[in-house]
Each structure stands twice: as structure tokens, then as C-alpha cells.
Image (cartoon, grey):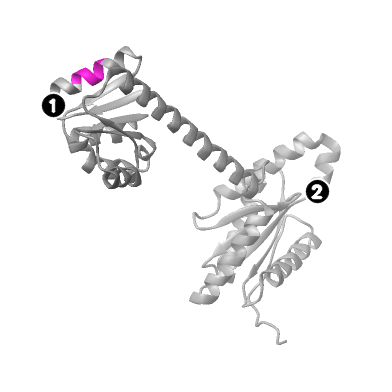
Amino acid sequence: MRVVVAHGRARDRRRLGEILVEAGHDVLEAADELDALARCLDSAPDVAVLDAEIGDWLVERIKADAHAFRTAVLLIEPAEPSVPRALRALERGVQDILVEPVRDSELVLRVMAAGRTKVLQEEMVFQAERLEAMILQDPLTGLANRRFILTQLDSLISAARRHGRALALAIVDVDHFKAVNDSHGHAEGDRVLTAVARSLRAHLRAEDQLGRLGGEEFLALLPDTDGPSAAAAAEKLRASVEQTGVTVSIGWAVWAGERAQELLGRADEALYAAKGAGRDQVSGAPATLPRRR
């Protein structure tokens, strides 16, 4: 493991570092707060062993950093801390507390335990991210799946209604996709879908969102986009996909104050119009006044 040892007294710092090096760890020594912070931020160590005089200031800086915050921190106190002080240290992110004079075996065991805890925490974070990806992402293309992209549509409609902003969406359908699967197999069909997904994503703005509705259909959400801009964006997407060797039909619609399903329905009608016009086409539904109920 990589361990930062920060102690104001050079003799103690060297002693702690030598013990940990003998135990097989990669040790970086620091003599003061700024030196210790720089080493923690630059190397994101597994464990930081900090003298309390340095650590009181340093712990908050380590835990506030996007990369170094996972470092397990051991604090060396000059004497047995009071219960309130120990609890405050734990609340700030300290993993464990050592009391001077620190015994060799205690130092090695506590550092190893802290490092193992860090590994377990990182594994938990990884598994949580993996589970989140399984819930929210389409496994083939890596795009948002149907559930998540429709949830995002609801959120964008709420924002558009609240702030009076424009909003458009486009449904993209790969032309003759069944024929690709029937003639070349599902592996080739999967390759086509991933190529289309990459092309669509590459030609959308950073604020746009893209998801797979299912099968060969994709949904692009276009915030702050009016009719002419939606038509231009859809045509850009159609032309970009054409470069992959397949074609798509696209139906777009501009939000007119209706619910998500009604907006999707208008875009779907436009998509069918594009297909009816011969495919490899773009058709749109500009904003219209919502129907009275």
C-alpha cells in the first residue's frame, strides 16, 4: 500500500516510515501540513498516518478532495483523547486513532486494517455504481435505458413548464433493421445498433440526452430547442448515421404544454410519416396548442 506519514518531529517521522517500509509499504514522508496535503492530493494514498497537530487541519482538506477523500486516515494523538474529541475525529473522517508512543506492531496492524477497510469501501462503491448502471443503462449501447430516458423526459417537461423554456424530442428508428437480423444474424444487428448509438451521441450537444427506447428505436431529448432547431438537429442526426452504412427515419416534436406520452405520440406519428415517405427521412410536429379537455 501507499502510505503518507506526516509528523512534525523528524525523528518520529523517520521511525514510523522505516517501520512501514519494512512491512512492505510504499511510504511518502511529510514534515508539515502543506507538504502532507500536496502528497495526499498528488498520490491519493491508501492510508495517511498524521500527527494530530497536522491532522486536525489536514483531515478536512483530504476528505474534501474528489480523489483523495477515499484515503483512510489514522490520527496520532499525544495522549489518550477524550471521548468527545475521539468522536469528533471520527465524524470528520478519521479511520482510527493511535496514541503515542506508538508501538511498532500496533502501527503495522492498524495501517493494514485501515487499508483493507479502504479496499472494501471501494468495492462497495464499485458494486453500487455497477448496480446503478444495470438499472439505468442499456447493456448493449451504454445509453440510458427506456425507464431512465422517460424519467428524464418527465423532468425536462417539468423544467420547461416551470421556466417557460422550449423543449423538443426526436424518435430515431433504424430502417429495415429486421432484414439486417434476418440476413446477417443478431451479432451484426447488435453491431449496427452500437454504431448508430455512437453516431447519435457524437452529434448531440452536451445538454441533450439520448436513450434506447427498445429494439431499434432511440429517443433524443433536446432542451431549449424550438421547431426550426429541432428540424435541423434531426436532419444532422439522420445524415450522421448514414455515414455508418445504414439509414434511419426520424420523427421530432416540439413540446406544446402536453404530457410526456402525448408529446411522444406526436413524435411517433411524425416518425410513421417519415417511414411512409420512403424512410431515410425526417418528419416533424411543431408545437401546437394543447387540446381542451
Of the two numbered discs 1 and 2 in the rendering, the one whose residue sits closer to the viewer: 1
Q: Tell me if 267 is positioned left or right of 226 in this view.
A: right
Q: Visible in this render: residue 231?
A: no
Q: Tell me if 12 is positioned left or right of 286 in this view.
A: left
* Region of the chain picked out in magenta, as a range: 14-18
Location of residue 142 with respect to 184 vertically, above or below: below
**Quarter occupied by the N terminus:** top left
Q: Residue at x 34, y 20 (%)?
A: 108
Name the residue that disc number 2 marks.
Answer: 176
Name the residue that disc number 1 marks.
Answer: 9
Q: From the top left corner, tell me how far across and down residue 224 is, in percent.
A: 51, 68
Main secondary structure along the magenta-highlighted residues? helix
Q: From the top left corner, tell me how far across and down residue 194 is, in percent.
A: 66, 41
Location of residue 140 with respect to 223 vertically, above or below: above
Location of residue 258 with respect to 29 vertically, above or below: below
Task: Name the residue furthest right.
Answer: 182
